[in-house]
Amino acid sequence: MTHVVTARCLDCRYTDCCVVCPVEAFRKLDDPAMLVIEPTVCIDCMLCVPECPVHAIYADNELPAHYAEWKEMNLALSAAGTTTTKKEDALPSAITLDKVHEREKTAGWTPVEPANAVG
């Protein structure tokens, strides 16, 4: 099992998660502007999950159906990213969890939070 960054991170790129990763599994991307997890590096420690302010990180076996494609997308996109372990400012376009929920509801989805998310 691995953890997966979903579309909730798109154009936000909060980096709270990568700071706590003990194996440097996070990759920073500019296009799309987000973070992803390199699945062959992730050790499934779950430390990153409660750090994400928009709850964008799920265990691969608990991905909501509307984010299922992100498991493969993390694998594909991680090759183009650069390893990141430092806290940086979120992107100017970053939104709050409430806004994420609004987007999901507008898309007809029921917001589902990761099991270890906080808040």
Image: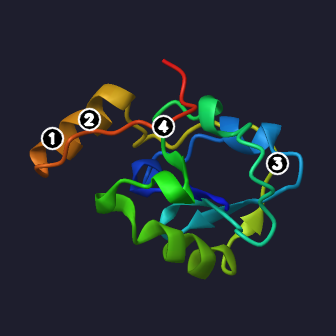
Task: Please identify the residue farthest to the right as the structure is shown.
Answer: 22
Q: Residue at x 74, y 52 (%)?
A: 44
Q: Amino acid at mark 4?
A: His
**Where is mark 1, residue-wise?**
105
Q: Amino acid at mark 3?
A: Thr
Q: Earlier in the sequence, mark 4 or mark 3?
A: 4
**Label 1 secondary element:** helix
1 or 3: mark nearer the eye: 1
**Where is mark 4, residue-wise?**
55
Q: Earlier in the sequence, mark 1 or mark 4?
A: 4
**Where is mark 3, residue-wise?**
85
Count how many numbered circles sit on residues in the image. Answer: 4
Determine whether, in the image, residue 79 is placed left or right of residue 99: right
- The correct choice, above or below, for 118 with respect to 111 in the image is above
Residue 51 location (% of width, % of height): 64, 31
Query: How far apart are the two marked residues, 2 and 4, measured between alpha carbons?
Result: 10 Å
Bin the neighbour count of mark 1 within 10 Å (Cα to Cα): few under 14, some 14-19, many 20 and up: few
Bin the neighbour count of mark 4 within 10 Å (Cα to Cα): few under 14, some 14-19, many 20 and up: many
Q: Earlier in the sequence, mark 1 or mark 3?
A: 3
Question: In this rendering, does residue 88 appear at all?
Answer: no
Query: How far apart are the two marked residues, 3 and 2, measured between alpha carbons?
Result: 27 Å
Residue in front for this viewpoint, 95 or 55: 55
**Where is mark 2, residue-wise?**
101
